[in-house]
Image (cartoon, rainbow, N blue to C red):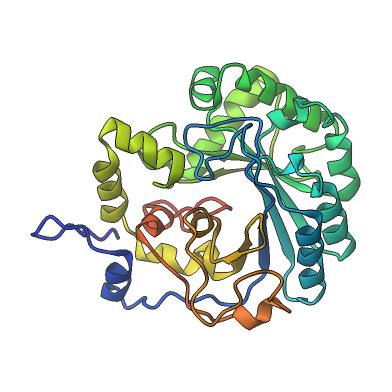
Amino acid sequence: MFYHARRMSDRLASFDEILSSHDLAPLRRAAVTTLQVNVGKRCNQACHHCHVDAGPKRSEMMTATTAERVLEVLDASPKVDTVDVTGGAPELNPSFRRLVEGARRAGRRVIDRCNLTVLHEPGMESLPEFFVEHGVELTCSLPCYSMKNVDQQRGKGVFDKSIESLRKLNGLGYGRSGSALTLNLVYNPVGAFLPGPQAALEQDYKRELGGAFGIEFHRLFTITNMPIKRFAADLERSGKQREYMSLLVNHFNPATVAGLMCRSLVSVGWEGTLYDCDFNQMLEIPLSAGLPRTIFELDATGVIDDAPIATAAHCFGCTAGAGSSCGGETVKAS
């Protein structure tokens, strides 16, 4: 069921108003089971949809001191079973491998959000073998299975480099049927529209990538483009900002709220500041008043369990249609 939220005054309802209308307010976190760590904004790509506004010229990078503090908090937080490392291109941070090694030594699942082409950067040649050695779960962005669409969104030559990286990872066992080396792909729409049904798109990807290139992977995650940072600027330039927000608001699905990723994770910014999610981090919307502000003030993640979650208009991106999270859809598409 979708909630059509346009009022007679032509004002779009706020996120909290719509939550209240479904008796879902206030939005609160449950138990934190995931630390999502953004280690910086430096990236070898500058994608049109990037909500981080990352790129080769960005210099913001998590320091070794902050990365070590993340590991200390992890040791003090037995309920946290997953460390989700993101960026930018997280692998470009000098502390990336130390962070991965420490989290794996502590027995935690580690997800690396990889753009695939970073494997072609100088000094990154040994990354695939490092991933295998430490059992890192790879969630790799590939916005389409066609060269035209990928290069349009990510830059000329990105598709070919991505395919080469996927073949390399497949050769090491990643993505193979029955393999414990998990390789998932991520789809983002190339325009101002919602993703199609995840299961159908996964079948399309497997058919096209398998047939043309012999590539295998485990799952496809569909993620809605968030109307913030670089994508928001593109919407404004094209005059589609209000149209896109209306699309998100008018496709609000209350069934998505239970599975929102902010309910089970806390986001750690490159400088150590804490946020409810990576999107709030990019908009610099802090945790609610009275909660720790930085990883250096946080002794264990349990102190922010059951805490209220800061919301804003971009939250409609995670609750439209079948929902959107770092793990793809949050409910089955209707």
- Give x and y (percent) for residue 17: 27, 70
| Foreground of the two, 4 or 205 | 4
Q: Residue at x 31, y 37 (%)?
A: 236
* Residue 262 against residue 130 in the figure, above or below: below
* Residue at x 69% of width, y 69% of height: 295
Q: In which quarter of the image is the N terminus?
A: bottom left
Q: Which residue lies furthest to the left in this view?
A: 8
Quarter location, residue 126: top right
Above or below, 215 against 200 in this view is above
Q: Is residue 146 left or right of residue 56?
A: left
Seen in the picture, residue 133 relative to 157 is either above or below; the reply is: below
| Direction from residue 325 to residue 5 in the image, left or right | left
Residue 225, picture quadrant: top left
Residues 178 and 253: in front is 253
Most foreground residue, 47 or 132: 47
Residue in the image at 36% along x and 65% along y: 254
Quadrant position of residue 166: top right
Asked if residue 174 lies left or right of residue 304, the reply is right
Which residue sits at x=81%, y=49%? 95
